[in-house]
Image: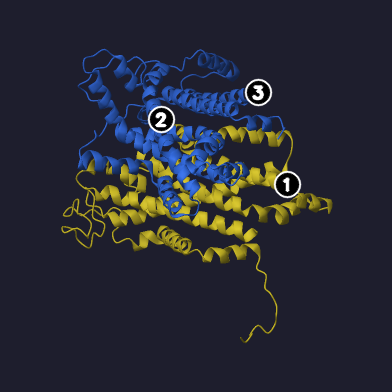
Chain colours: A yellow, B blue
Amino acid sequence: MANHDVFREETIRSPLAHSWYIYQQNTIGMIALWALIFIGVLALIGPWIAPYPLDHQDVGALLNPPSWFEQGEVHFFFGTDDLGRDLLSQLIYGAQLTFGGAFITVILAMLIGSAIGIIGGMSRGMQASILHHFLDTLLSIPSLLLAIIIISVLGPGYFNTLLAVFLALLPLFTRAVYRAVHDELNKEYIIALRLDGATPLRILRYGILPNIVETFVSQTTRAMTSAILDITALGFLGLGAQRPLPEWGTMLSDTMELVFLAPWTVTLPGLTILATILIINIVGEGLRQAIIKGMD
Amino acid sequence: MLIYIIKRLNVLVITLFLLSVVAFLLQRQVITDFVNTDNMLGDYQRYLMAMLSGDFGISQASGNPVLQDILTIFPATLELCLMAFIVSLILGVPFGILAGLSRGGSADYGIMTVTLVGVSIPTFWFAMLLMMFFSLHLGWLPVSGRMGLLYEIPVVTGFNLLDTLLSNQPYKYEAFFDSLQHLALPTIVLAALPTTEVIRQVRASIGEEMDKNYIKAAQAKGLNTFQIIKRHGLRNALPAVIPSLGLQFGRVLTTAMITETVFSWPGIGPWMVNNIYLEDHSAIQGGMLFIAAFVLLANMATDMLHLLINPLKRDELYGKS
């Protein structure tokens, strides 16, 4: 067989590029990734592509079933609710509130929480010990309970929900990053780096950070799913976004009394939430596996 | 062991102290509009004393002492949580073993897929789906509440199942089955989360144990898989599951608050949400301290249980391993 490889040179990918290569072999993962990008795009440009404006009510079409039912009409693709609002438009608008809100919250919590975690992890003694024990105990209170506690102080509302979820996610990141940095810091290659006279900042940049990417990825997906679940749950309990904001959980609590009359107003928003979370979980798990393999 | 207990108690006390400070500052912020005092430390001291003697103040909504309100409501929540844990163990352990034994096989794949859906499904939506199907469509199970209104059962323990059996009404068995029926749907909803956790844990630890040499020795002796699992695998795999169950308790309690809201279960969830609406601050504060303290205590208790059952962990504690 002819060998076209004239220059017998092996390109060695960086571990991260290699991880990405491994991830691309994962078909389900790639489908989920595209779906995730799709939801992200919806959250970004949703208001421009939604078929109806947010406050549009069609009095002639109350409780229209979805278009695939016999009585359904195709211009209300997912049907309408009891006030004649188009369900599809509401869900598209809701992507911004639920998914977009969760995304921004998680990114902020990741940046700030990780920063605290890194500072704690790089320091030793009393400071680190206090942080460690304090976080341990704080983390035994689940994030939704923490969020409810914070909401009970701030009062209900969409912005307060985001703030509460942000505050509840902080310890999650701090704790995970703290632990990862701390474990990494005691390994021998770091000690070698230190003996070479590397400054702490350099150790952090070239020694530790590239090796704890997996922690970041798995924590971010966990935080993302729990942020969406928390935001929708708070919306459902009536503590989060209030109607007419079409936050997915709020939509569900609104249609609680329509369960019997119009089941689609319950199933469709719920399916949207479930699909979003499943997609995030699949992407996150795939990335994590790929990074672990890529590092080896 | 004693040293460890003292250590743990120490952390617990400090955390509760911090919690009480936060709660105090909140209350102060709300009340300063009415009372204008500058003596913060003295206020806090009085506040702490009141808390320690179980005086959480009086609920503005119901007019009863907050602690009394909580204590009448909380058993309903606890009953639900305990049932969910029992169901999760009954379902989770066998499926976890099955998945752990067939790692990478089709049974494992199927179980893990269901588990993934179980983690991803929003509680309130799951509850509404079950309610739509079993209560409205099939009409098998009641939609809401703890017991039919026809039965009158005196409250002894607060746990409905026990109370119905303890009472000496002529219809006590009917009442018992009625409250079981009412429990069914909320329990299934609530059990989803801990069950997935139990399955994952059991699968991981069984998978780990089964590769070890003593299992191979047992196989060489001629024991069949069932015997190996029963005598060796489970005994070494189960203790690792306990601490994660303890950590689940907080999440189950929170999920219970949502489930209760859907099923109009008269527990701490609807009570708390209602009080947040009413801005009943003494009730919110009391409820918050109570729930947080309960979760922390439950965690500590499972930690202790884990220590008692698992001698390996004790060695780790004293740096012997």
Chain hosting mark 3: B
Q: Position of residue A159 (x, y in %)?
A: 44, 43
Looking at the rendered structure, whether the residues under marks 1 and 3 are on a common chain is answered as no
- Label 1 neighbour load within 10 Å: few <14, some 14-19, many 20+: some
- Label 2 neighbour load within 10 Å: few <14, some 14-19, many 20+: many
> In this figure, which residue is indicated by the disc labeled 3?
B1
Judge from the rendering whether residue A155 lies leftward or rightward of residue A211; answer left or right: left
In-front residue for pair B50/A259: A259
Q: Position of residue A62 (x, y in %)?
A: 18, 51
- Label 3 neighbour load within 10 Å: few <14, some 14-19, many 20+: few
Find the distance from the CA under tag 1 to the CA under tag 3: 30 Å
Toward which corner of the image does residue A234 lie, by quadrant? top left
The residue sitting at 31% across, 15% down in the picture is: B166
Residue B81, label in figure: 2
**Mark 3 or 2 closer to N-term?**
3
Residue A185, label in figure: 1
The residue sitting at 68% across, 31% down in the picture is: B315
Q: Secondary structure at mark 2?
A: helix
- The residue type indicated by label 3 comes to Met
Mark whose residue sits in front, 3 or 2: 3
Relative vertical location of residue B302 with respect to residue A288 in this rendering, above or below: above
- The residue type indicated by label 1 comes to Leu
Looking at the rendered structure, whether the residues under marks 3 and 2 are on a common chain is answered as yes
Q: Position of residue A139 (x, y in %)?
A: 55, 36
Find the distance from the CA under tag 1 to the CA under tag 2: 41 Å
